[in-house]
Image (tube, rainbow, N blue to C red):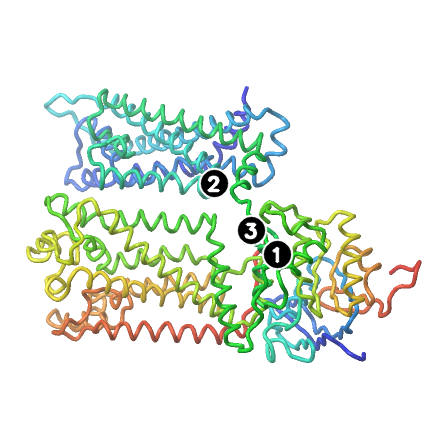
């Protein structure tokens, strides 16, 4: 036997139970509205075999389609990297052979992925049946059982789970990073959806969701989807086999290839320019060194990669409304319009800024190497370097968001600096309001796409910088957890402070709602970051320059407060390499 | 004491309800190797961090070369340190890592950096990234970064961690030669033999209280 018994024991552990429960929850979420509709009736009744139809509908719901690639990877996809990094491999390998070890890992991973989704869906179906079966009544017309279709769907979900779990294991082994086991399949899943929906609508097989919903013209229905996934699964298993074997048997071979590329002649003749006589110039050079040191830590950093990958996916999800509207109307868009319509909305700005917390979660970046450069400079020099680093990283992030949103929708856009037909329809017909896109007449008439997009970019950047500097200040003053809590509190404050709440608190009549609008426009940082919540010449909302000044002053003040707080700061360094 | 390089006065450090240092008062003389022994959690590393300026004392103060840490200066001006496990940028070679650190003060050339790496028994021309170093190699590189700019004061917390017996012997010789050149070394170690053979004075740290064990170098054939 392969060592799959012990692998299976590990794979089907607590994480497996939790993932299966998560899958069940997704099914229940998808079925919730249908079940609720039955119970909301005066006399709750349902058609015969309605429980099957409800579960089938739930399996096409957003919850399960969104979570499936993550849930399948949780039980066992990170196991190989965990074994290598923890040293458990050294205890395990002498008791088996390399091939058996790898096959055991593959089987356990694929089986756990398969069972996570199938058992979870079955559990969900049983619960749906418990709620719906007692309400089912015989009707006058014959009802065809959908049991075969349901079983087929569950098996397809199982294959999908096995495939994503295996891909997680493969990608984590390639990068030798456990987080990649969970994040990479999810990212790949969405990248494929983006590619198909935005660039290659005809290639339906590119979209992994189409395998689960059986959307498209599959020649043999579910069989084709199942067989394709089985073939891909075998491919992933082969890939993992080759890479894992390479890692276990001949790790030095790979290293030597890498060093071949890395070989450079080293000259020791290099002399450092002597320290400047002017202390400020030395400080500036040290500030630059701190910034470079922090950016060097990006190399091979899974968290940085994950932040940008998730930001890319979030851009796709948030811009979907605008892109789908243009697609449905058969009209084009100006290249920056998707960005303007997506991030002209406060909620989008909020979501994308919160994701940045992931990039700065280890602020103020006190790795084990930091004491060595800290004793070679002053505290304020170090903090200035950190401040410049977080500012530059934030600029990079926001520019990435801008580029990603524009590129995702580029298939259907033009570059000229004029509003598109889509914008005109959205703005002048009221369709924009109906689909909650902030394409307002005042935006169309008082600005042009380049100007509008760059203003939104600047507003987003300043808002995000205020949030990041607030996090830094609270982090230095009260500790890491408090810093992250401050970022969330800042976002929550902006989110909750809306005109309706303001109106309720001050008991304003409806005719004075505009006052609440104006007050919130000034008081909420999130509204300050929202383009259309500004004064374009005919109301009392803040003008754009006033917002720039407010945000700018806030950033400078927060930096000064942080400098003061740093005097009493205790440095607690993390262990290991950066 | 004629010429103390470090003067610690009533140093107290509290984390929440836990008092880790309880009014430590001690002067450390220039040009000697001072050993500090103590169990895990006795407060050695916290005291070192207070001397380095990484932790702010709850009470009392530390003077290095007559300047108060946290008031006159942020960190001691001429110092080399190893505190806890050495951390480096794993993707770069040892030479590149030290080049980056040396570039901050620009007191020495790259040749001198390479010579220091050679002095601790590593090959400066090796392209192997630090991420692939063994624990012992990493420790040697940590010692190299502490001594490369020839600081007058070195704070070394468990510098022999991960070294084999040859490595330990080499490092003992290195520290002795540094002390002969007039450098001051504060050395914390669990290994009583390191302390016995190397140190001119020995203090013991126990539950945040420091006591002097001996103030003069050991004579041949005696032990603590």
- Using residue A208 as the reference point, say whether residue A178 is left or right of it: right
Q: Earlier in the sequence, mark 1 or mark 2?
A: 2
Q: Position of residue A325 (x, y in %)?
A: 14, 47
Using the rendered view, name the quadrant where residue A344 is placed: bottom left
A49 lies above or below A556? above
Q: Chain of mark 1?
A: A
Q: CA distance from mark 3 to mark 1?
A: 16 Å
Q: Position of residue A316 (x, y in %)?
A: 27, 47
Label 2: which residue? Answer: A175
Q: CA distance from mark 3 to mark 2?
A: 18 Å
Q: How many numbered marks are there?
A: 3
- Using residue A546 as the reference point, say whether residue A356 is left or right of it: right
Q: Which mark is residue A268?
A: 1
- Residue occupying image coordinates x 13% and y 25%: A139
A60 lies above or below A414? above
Q: Which mark is residue B92?
A: 3
Label 1: state its secondary structure: loop
């Amino acid at each position: 036997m392969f060592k799959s018994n012990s692998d299976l024991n590990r794979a089907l552990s607590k994480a497996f139970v939790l993932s299966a429960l998560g899958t069940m929850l997704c099914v229940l979420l998808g079925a919730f509205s249908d079940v609720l509709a039955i119970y909301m009736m005066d006399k709750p009744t349902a058609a015969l075999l309605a429980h099957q139809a409800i579960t089938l509908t739930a399996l096409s719901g957003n919850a399960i389609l969104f979570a499936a690639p993550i849930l399948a990877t949780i039980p066992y996809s990170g196991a190989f990297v965990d074994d290598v990094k923890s040293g458990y491999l050294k205890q395990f390998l002498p008791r088996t052979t390399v091939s058996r070890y790898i096959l055991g890992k593959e089987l356990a991973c694929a089986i756990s992925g398969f069972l996570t989704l199938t058992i979870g869906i079955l559990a969900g179906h049983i619960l749906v049946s418990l709620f719906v079966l007692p309400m089912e009544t015989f009707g006058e017309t014959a009802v065809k059982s959908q049991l075969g279709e349901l079983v087929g769907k569950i098996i397809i979900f199982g294959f999908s789970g096995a495939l994503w779990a295996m891909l997680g294991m493969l990608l984590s082994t390639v990068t030798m990073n456990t987080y990649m086991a969970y994040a990479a399949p999810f990212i790949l899943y969405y990248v494929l959806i983006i590619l198909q929906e935005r660039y290659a609508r005809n290639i339906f097989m590119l979209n992994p969701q189409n395998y689960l919903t059986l959307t498209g013209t599959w020649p043999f229905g579910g069989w084709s989807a199942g067989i394709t996934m089985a073939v891909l699964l075998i491919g992933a298993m082969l890939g993992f086999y080759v890479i894992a074997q390479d890692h276990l048997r001949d790790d030095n071979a790979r290293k030597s290839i890498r060093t071949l590329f890395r070989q450079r002649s080293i000259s020791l003749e290099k002399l450092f320019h002597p320290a400047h006589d002017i202390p400020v110039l030395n400080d500036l050079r040290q500030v630059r060194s701190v910034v470079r040191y922090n950016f060097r830590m990006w190399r091979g950093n899974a968290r940085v990669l994950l932040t940008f990958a998730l930001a890319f996916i979030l851009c796709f999800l948030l811009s979907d409304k605008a892109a789908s509207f243009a697609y449905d109307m058969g009209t084009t868009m100006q290249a920056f319009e998707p960005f303007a319509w997506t991030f002209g909305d406060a909620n989008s700005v909020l979501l994308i800024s919160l994701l940045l917390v992931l990039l700065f979660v280890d602020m103020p970046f006190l790795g084990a190497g930091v004491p060595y450069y800290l004793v070679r400079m002053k505290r304020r020099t170090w903090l200035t370097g950190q401040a410049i680093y977080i500012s530059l990283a934030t600029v990079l992030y926001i520019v990435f968001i801008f580029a990603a949103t524009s590129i995702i929708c580029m298939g259907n856009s033009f570059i000229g600096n004029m509003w598109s037909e889509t914008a005109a329809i959205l703005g002048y017909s009221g369709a924009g309001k109906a689909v909650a896109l902030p394409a307002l007449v005042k935006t169309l008439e008082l600005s042009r796409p380049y100007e509008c997009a760059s203003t939104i970019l600047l507003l987003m950047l300043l808002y995000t910088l205020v949030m990041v500097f607030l996090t830094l200040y609270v982090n230095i003053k009260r500790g890491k957890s408090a810093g992250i809590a401050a970022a969330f509190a800042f976002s929550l404050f902006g989110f909750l402070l809306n005109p309706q709440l303001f109106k309720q608190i001050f008991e304003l009549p409806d005719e004075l709602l505009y006052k609440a609008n104006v007050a919130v426009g000034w008081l909420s940082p999130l509204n300050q970051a929202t383009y259309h919540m500004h004064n374009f010449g005919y109301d009392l909302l803040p003008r754009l320059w006033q917002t720039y000044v407010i945000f700018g002053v806030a950033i400078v003040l927060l930096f000064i407060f942080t400098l003061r707080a740093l005097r009493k700061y205790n440095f607690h360094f993390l262990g290991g390499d950066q | 004491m004629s010429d103390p390089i470090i003067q610690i006065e009533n140093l107290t450090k509290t984390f929440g309800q836990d008092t880790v240092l309880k009014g430590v008062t001690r002067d450390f003389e220039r040009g000697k190797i001072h050993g500090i022994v103590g169990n895990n959690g006795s407060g050695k590393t916290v005291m070192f961090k207070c001397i380095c300026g990484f932790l702010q004392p709850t009470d009392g103060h530390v003077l290095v070369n007559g300047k108060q840490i946290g008031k006159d200066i942020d960190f001691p001006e001429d110092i080399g340190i190893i505190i806890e496990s050495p951390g480096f940028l794993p993707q770069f070679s040892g030479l590149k890592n030290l080049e980056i650190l040396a570039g901050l003060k620009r007191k020495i050339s790259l040749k001198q950096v390479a010579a220091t790496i050679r002095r601790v028994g590593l090959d400066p021309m090796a392209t192997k990234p630090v991420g692939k170093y063994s624990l012992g190699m990493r420790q040697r590189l940590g010692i190299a970064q502490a001594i490369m700019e020839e600081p007058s004061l070195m704070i070394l917390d468990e510098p022999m961690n991960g070294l084999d017996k040859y490595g330990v012997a080499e490092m003992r010789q290195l520290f002795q030669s540094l002390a002969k050149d007039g450098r001051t070394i504060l050395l914390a170690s669990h290994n009583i033999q390191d302390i016995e053979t190397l140190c001119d004075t020995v203090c013991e740290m126990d539950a945040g209280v420091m006591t002097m064990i001996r103030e003069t170098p050991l004579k041949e054939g005696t032990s603590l």
